[in-house]
Image: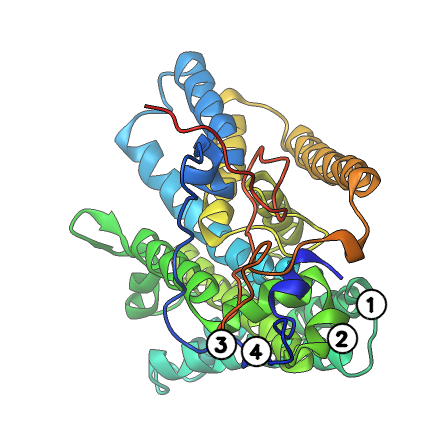
């Protein structure tokens, strides 16, 4: 049984834990004399921060156009789309799944919103068109979630099939042609600004903060990490695994649909090929930001940092005249490197792991978990080799 499963297992002494109640997740307090690492302070987002800083410095030195107001505004709008998709992808990755359909859902939802607005000549309120597009994305996620949770089909196969179906539906609805022109009111959603900051950037920040709190401060967030750690152990401790999985895919589809609507609004038209390749960029953003493709590790803020890195790669490549195909190679290599590093790390930890029978009780030696509460699982930190293991007490530092 994993550390996370033990944290939600029945307490010693015959009593049973009643699970994690909905509400604020208590912050982990350092033990007396414990030395906090920088990674523990910054969280797993720190994994992508050095990459972000180095990349920003390199682009600043390479081209004078990078730090111009026009380019930074354009970069912010691009990153906003990636970040919203990446947050949805992250939720699925935390459950040890993957959603390859997000790019196609981006294109489908954008076409649905654009075509409804265009065909009705503005007769249907823009809010209605946006809502319909979001429902389409949620429906795609619901189908993915039901197949994964109830039929136990591999997420890779399910979402790969949905990717093809959604892309085909996009081409069918649009006849393979761009849907234009669109009303100014629709274009204002993704093209407008507030207090000098684009609407897209505001939405990106709000969505990231909301899901960061949802994942770290609610029972649902605890369940997501528990399912990603060990679905079977989570089920045995009372976690509604199927509902958690379905909700994760529904949220991923909905956020991809929201990104599709925002992209169509920003472009001022519905492009049937929009969203192509976004699934790989979303996965890359997650792993660069510290998420593990094996599940249960990662954060919404980390996904945002990763999206910034991916956005800078694309933006910098354009400024420097680098062939975009090279950028695809770089993104693919980053994903492979992240998976390989995580796999080697897990193998090393597995070789050093103690038998479960020798593991201390959830609250530590002689510290049973009180009834009505549970020990909190460690989210893990970038560069922390003991993530998910009991933290030893260290000598206090003045």
Which label belongs to residue 134?
Answer: 3
Which one is earlier in the sequence, the residue at label 4 or at label 3? 4
Q: Residue 346: where, in percent of width, then height?
A: 76, 42
Crowding around mark 2 (Cα neighbors within 10 Å: few <14, some 14 to 19, many 20+) is: many
- 175 up-or-down from 87: above or below: below
Question: Judging from the image, what secondary structure is the residue with disc 4 in?
Answer: loop
Crowding around mark 4 (Cα neighbors within 10 Å: few <14, some 14 to 19, many 20+) is: many
Which label belongs to residue 148?
Answer: 2
Q: Is residue 115 visible?
A: no
Q: Nearer the viewer, mark 4 or mark 2?
A: 4
Label 1 close to label 2 by CB (< 8 Å): yes
Front-most of 383 and 102?
A: 383
- Classify residue 319 as left or right of residue 192: right
Question: Judging from the image, what secondary structure is the residue with disc 1 in?
Answer: loop
Q: CA distance from mark 1 to mark 2?
A: 6 Å
Q: Which residue is mark 4?
A: 17
Q: CA distance from mark 4 to mark 2?
A: 28 Å
Look at 43% across and 77% down and name the residue there. 22
Q: Residue 52: where, in percent of width, then height?
A: 47, 29
Q: Residue 366: where, in percent of width, then height?
A: 57, 58
In this view, the residue farthest toward the top is 61
Which label belongs to residue 154?
Answer: 1
Look at 49% across and 45% down and name the residue there. 302
Using the rendered view, name the quadrant where residue 396 is placed: top left
């Amino acid at each position: 049984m994993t550390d996370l499963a033990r944290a939600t297992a029945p307490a010693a002494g015959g009593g049973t834990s009643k699970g994690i109640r909905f509400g604020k997740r208590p912050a982990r307090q350092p033990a007396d004399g414990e030395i906090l690492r920088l990674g523990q302070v910054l969280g797993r987002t720190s994994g992508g921060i050095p990459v972000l800083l180095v990349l920003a410095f390199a682009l600043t030195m390479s081209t004078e156009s990078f730090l111009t107001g026009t380019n930074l505004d354009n970069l912010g709008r691009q990153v906003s789309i990636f970040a919203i998709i990446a947050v949805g992808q992250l939720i699925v990755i935390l459950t040890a799944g993957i959603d390859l359909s997000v790019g196609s859902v981006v294109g489908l939802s954008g076409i649905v919103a654009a075509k409804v607005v265009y065909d009705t000549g503005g007769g249907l309120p823009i809010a209605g068109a946006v809502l319909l597009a979001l429902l389409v994305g949620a429906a795609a996620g619901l189908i993915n979630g039901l197949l994964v949770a109830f039929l136990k089909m591999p997420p890779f196969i399910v979402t790969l099939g949905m990717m093809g179906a959604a892309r085909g539906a996009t081409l069918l609805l649009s006849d393979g042609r761009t849907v234009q022109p669109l009303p100014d009111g629709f274009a204002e959603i993704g093209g407008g600004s507030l207090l000098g900051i684009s609407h897209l950037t505001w939405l990106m920040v709000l969505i990231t903060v909301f899901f960061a709190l949802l994942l770290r401060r609610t029972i649902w967030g605890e369940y997501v990490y528990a399912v990603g750690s060990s679905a079977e152990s989570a089920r045995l401790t009372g976690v509604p695994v199927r509902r958690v999985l379905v909700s994760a895919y529904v949220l991923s589809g909905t956020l991809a649909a929201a990104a599709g609507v925002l992209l169509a609004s920003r472009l001022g038209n519905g492009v049937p090929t929009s969203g192509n390749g976004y699934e790989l960029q979303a996965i890359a953003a997650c792993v660069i930001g510290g998420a593990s493709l094996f599940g249960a590790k990662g954060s919404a803020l980390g996904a945002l940092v990763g999206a910034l890195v991916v956005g800078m790669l694309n933006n910098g490549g354009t400024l420097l005249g680098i062939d975009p195909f090279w950028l695809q190679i770089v993104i693919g290599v980053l994903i492979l490197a992240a998976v390989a590093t995580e796999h080697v790390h897990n193998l090393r930890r597995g070789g050093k792991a103690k038998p479960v029978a020798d593991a201390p009780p959830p609250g530590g030696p002689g510290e049973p978990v009180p009834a009505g509460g549970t020990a909190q699982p460690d989210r893990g930190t970038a560069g922390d080799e003991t993530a998910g293991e009991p933290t030893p007490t260290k000598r206090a530092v003045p």
